[in-house]
Amino acid sequence: MNHKLKHLKCIAGLLLFCMIFVMMFFTIFTAAHFLHECTGAKCLTCHELHVAEALTKQFAAAIMTVVAAFFTALLSNRIMIADSISPFPGRTLVMDKVRMDN
Ligand SMILES: [Zn+2]
């Protein structure tokens, strides 16, 4: 079970890295193409800038959601560990070193 949790953490970290990388890529793309020779209403660069801006906003919202979920899970885990009841699978009374013999 601990092995599976380690893989999930690895995948979550990789996804977070990819999201941050894509967001930074679009930010750099926007900064690099902000001043361009605009051809008018059907400018492809302007269209790409609008798409990049929309994706950056969506990724920012997704990253904020992930961060909020992470801190919520962290806080609930700390609170629940004190009561020896954890919402995460694999957490047992033995792992919390709870004595049951008195
Ligand atoms: Zn343009």
Image (cartoon, grey):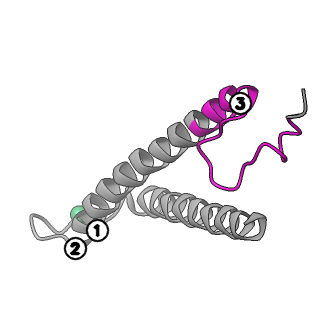
Mark whose residue sits in front, 1 or 2: 1
Mark count: 3
- Which region is colored magenta? 73-99
Mark 1: secondary structure: helix
Q: Where is residue 13 in the image (x, y as percent from the top left)?
A: 65, 61
Q: Which residue is drawn at 77% across and 64% down?
A: 2
**Image mark for residue 44:** 2
Out of 92 and 70, give the one closest to the viewer: 92
- Left or right: where 60 falls relative to 87: left
Residue for badge 1 = 48
Q: Do the residues labelled 2 and 3 touch (CB within 8 Å)?
A: no
Alpha carbon separation for disc pair 1 and 2: 6 Å
Is tag 2's residue or tag 3's residue first in the polypeptide sequence?
Answer: 2
Q: Quadrant of ligand 1?
A: bottom left
* Callouts 1 and 2 close, C-beta under 8 Å: yes
Q: Give the answer, above or below, for where 90 lies relative to 1.
A: above
The amino acid on which the numbered mark 3 sits, given as a three-letter code, is: Arg
| Farthest left residue in view | 41
On whether residue 92 falls in the magenta region, the answer is yes
Which residue type does callout 1 highlight? Answer: Glu
Of badges 2 and 3, the one in the foreground is: 3
Query: Is disc 3 placed on a helix, strand or loop?
Result: helix
Q: Which of 37 and 28 is in front in this view?
A: 28
Mark-to-mark CA distance, 2 and 3: 51 Å
State how far apart marks 3 and 1 are (Cα).
44 Å
Instruction: Report whether the residue tagged 2 is closer than 8 Å to ligand 1.
Output: yes
| Other residues around mark 3 within 10 Å, as few (<14) / some (14–19) / many (≥20) | few
At 39% from the left edge and 45% from the top edge, which residue is drawn? 61
Q: Nearer the viewer, mark 3 or mark 1?
A: 3
Residue visible at 51% across and 47% down?
66
